[in-house]
Amino acid sequence: MTIVQFAPFQSLVQPAFWHALTELKIDVLRLSDDEQPVTATYTAGRAVKDRETGQEIALGCNLTASGDAFSKTPQVPQNAVAATGVFKNFNTIEDFKNADKTALFNQVADEIWKSITVDKSTALLNRFLVITYADLKKYKYFYWFAFPAFAAKPAWEIDGEWLAAENALGAETLSSIQSQLHASPRPFFLVRTVENQTTIAPVEEYDTFFANVPPEDRVIGFVDPSALPTNPGWPLRNLLAYLLALHPETAQGVRILCLRDVEPPVAGSTGGWKSRFGILKQSGTGAATTERPAAVGWEKNIQGKLGARVADLAPMMDPTRLADQAVDLNLKLMRWRILPALDLEKVANTRCLLLGAGTLGCYVARTLMGWGVRTITFVDSARVSFSNPVRQPLFDFEDCLNGGKPKAACAAEKLKKIFPGVNASGHNLSIPMPGHPIPPASVEQAKKDVATLEKLVDEHDVVFLLMDSRESRWLPTVLGAAKGKIVLNAALGFDTFLVMRHGARTPGTDGKRLGCYYCNDIVAPTDSLTDRTLDQMCTVTRPGLASIAASTAVELLVSLLQHPAGIHTPAPPLSSAQSAADSGSSPPAYESILGLVPHQLRGFLAQFRNVPIVGAAYDRCTGCSETVVGAYEKDGFEMLLQAFNDTEFLPRLTGLDKLYEETQLALDGDDMVDADEDDF
Amino acid sequence: MLTRSDFDQACKAYVDAHRNARASGVKDYPAGWIWTEHPYVLNLGYLSRTRHLSGTPHPRTDVGEADDFNHPSVEEDDAVWHSTEESLTCNQYVVYSATFGVPAFYFTLHDRSGSPLALEQVVQSALFRPNTLPSPDGNTFAVTLPHSAFSLLSQGDHPTLGTPSWYLHPCNTAEVVGEIMAEVEEGRTNLLRCMEAWFMVLGNIVDLFAGE
């Protein structure tokens, strides 16, 4: 005779179980590591066909823990039976590792034994233990199940072979058992057939139910979670222990039905009844014992070794990771659907420095995030004031209290709230400006501020000029030109805006060098009146204008990034701008895959019209001319200090008398000069 | 195109018609679906069922550093059979896509521990017919299905349960199901047939009999 080898329970944990544990831990247990009742279920074992080999594969002897495991009234699925257990959650991984597992295990085994010998009940035969440690920050759950089973010494053996129950008992009997179990499911049961009448009863009624039934007509059955032909499932072990303890004569031979049919087989289908039948014997002393046999049953891990398992639910639960994937998904959809050649990585990896965290800064940052840009740095010296939140979408009322939070840091913090995956930071910094002399006492501070700004420009690929004054754009214009960075400029009037990209220091692929903010001031294109309004740094502007201008600036950047020539992308010729966009097959050199990459756009909200403009670089420009950039590179802060302190320095340097007058004119509108005062 | 109430009726009709696998054993339409309504909100009902698929255990980090572990003392035991079989649990849902006016297939796939499978493993699982899905190629959250009624396998929240799921994007479904419906008896708008046609289309990609 061969030893019966039992298929151990295998825990099968639904994600909902971990959700329930998380809730239990946070809302109820908190720091308590008291034992809790827990419920799991199992049903008859099933086999599936492997699609490659076509062989039947037993699906394992599953004990399923689901979302209502901790509920007082757990739902048991149809055709399944419940098992109750002991759940213990440890607060630290060390506690989990160091726990006295043998003691915990023995405690459960003792309970089962007491239930058998004292209560003479089968209720706890499937009692199990599960210990956990929940790392809620990382959505990792360490766990270890144990299914204590009493090991018979000597082991149970099979008399003959395991048979198809259909052959041993007949389909009619099976059908009758199945329908009675369906009506009142129970994990263990007695079966007798008297005068062709098959009835089942609880195992506890052994003596009365089997009183006049000869041993060869007695059958003891259990819902068998195993689907292996010659290996009954784990619940049988404790059932046999129960029988041996209370009905020791069963050792001489007990007829066991492994019930594996939760519903009758479909007529005509192959296979028929799946249940198994066997006669088991145990060559023990045959004397009842009250001493608890040794118990086994710690579950092995994936490697087949004794040890805990771990569930990693981060991909499903970690909001940061979910957001990260979702952000990318929207963008990738755009690529898949519309623009297969779109280089999203290039956009995402572009580091953006936003000078100004006001209306324009807020909108630019949000649009950049929409494009998947991951590095966004703000520079601003102001604090959030009560007038800001309604127009500046990164701030709210709370931010204005107690004198207001520093805008740059606050904006960065808000970006992280919107999307934790963004690398956002803020610097509280005032940018020195020409025509604003620096008192000797403040020179050191100004030097530091300039150094900080220089470093920031170095560390980014794109500089956005989003300040509210004209002069504060000068220093970053020079730095951007000197360091070869992409500079995007946005400025607002009452109902007009300017969005432009600064030309590179060297000519574009068409041999022409595009101008900067200051070049184009001087070389006014067609409409000098329009030009002038832009320079008037209005504190009042139509509320929708900022988001239009900010979005335009970001989209201009993205179009530029998608052009192979990058910062050297030529501006589209004005005359052909319209027709080029419509015309067919081969895109001209000035088009990126997203279309034209204009040099400047001037928007007129009064007419709901945008006008593309091209302005060439001016060789006497105070911002980007070689004279100015060269002088900065040669003399550094000394040169800048002269520019800040002496209004005549730059005109003198570039030989521009006219510029002097213009600057003077601009500075006359005094209140628009102070960046701290208000933003548009 | 189905309206919300068409969808509800179609699903209920389908559940009734295909409660159990066909007696003949012919696997034509997937059975065992249950219709569930949202506990409080109307018009959020969906079909669901759970299937267990076989799978090979994939190497994963268990609690590795066993050295500093307080292991239980374990008795010798010959009467145990050892298995290394991994079982995958697949929860399947058919929900209504309000945007496209068609049913949409949502599912979750996780291993024994409850850990969700990575996209690479999802694509290779027995849930999908062999070689119908391209390799995600390092992408962790979606694959495109270029020449299919379903353009995209992607992640999204279950519309009723709000839990993270995988789903097949339904944007071309109406067209393909419509073509099939045009073939069936004319002049008879039959919601059950429509649902069956949809399952037929879905069955080209998803092995709806996996785990049976």
Image (cartoon, coloured by chain):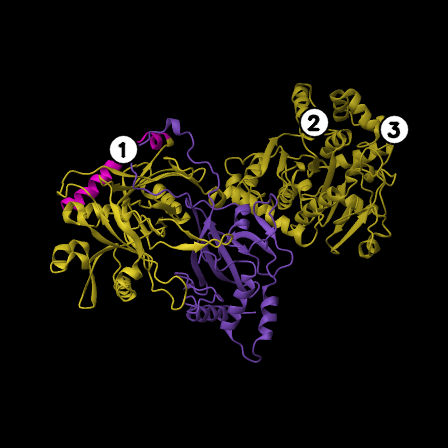
Chain colours: A yellow, B purple
Q: What stretch is highlighted in magenta?
A: A94-119
Residue type at mark 1 is: Thr
Q: Is residue A15 above or below residue A88?
A: below
- Number of marks in picture: 3
Does residue A49 appear anywhere in the picture? yes
Q: Name the residue under label 3.
A: A655
Taking depth in this image into account, of A330 and B208 the one nearest to the observer is B208
Q: Name the residue under label 1.
A: A102
Q: In this view, does A211 lie above or below A140?
A: below
Mark 1 Cα-neighbour bin, 10 Å: few <14, some 14–19, many ≥20: some
Residue type at mark 2 is: Glu
The reply to whether the magenta stretch includes residue A347 is no
Q: Is residue A213 left or right of residue A146?
A: left
Name the N-terminal-most of marks 1 and 3. 1
**What element does badge 2 sit on?**
helix
Name the residue: 77% across, 37% down: A666
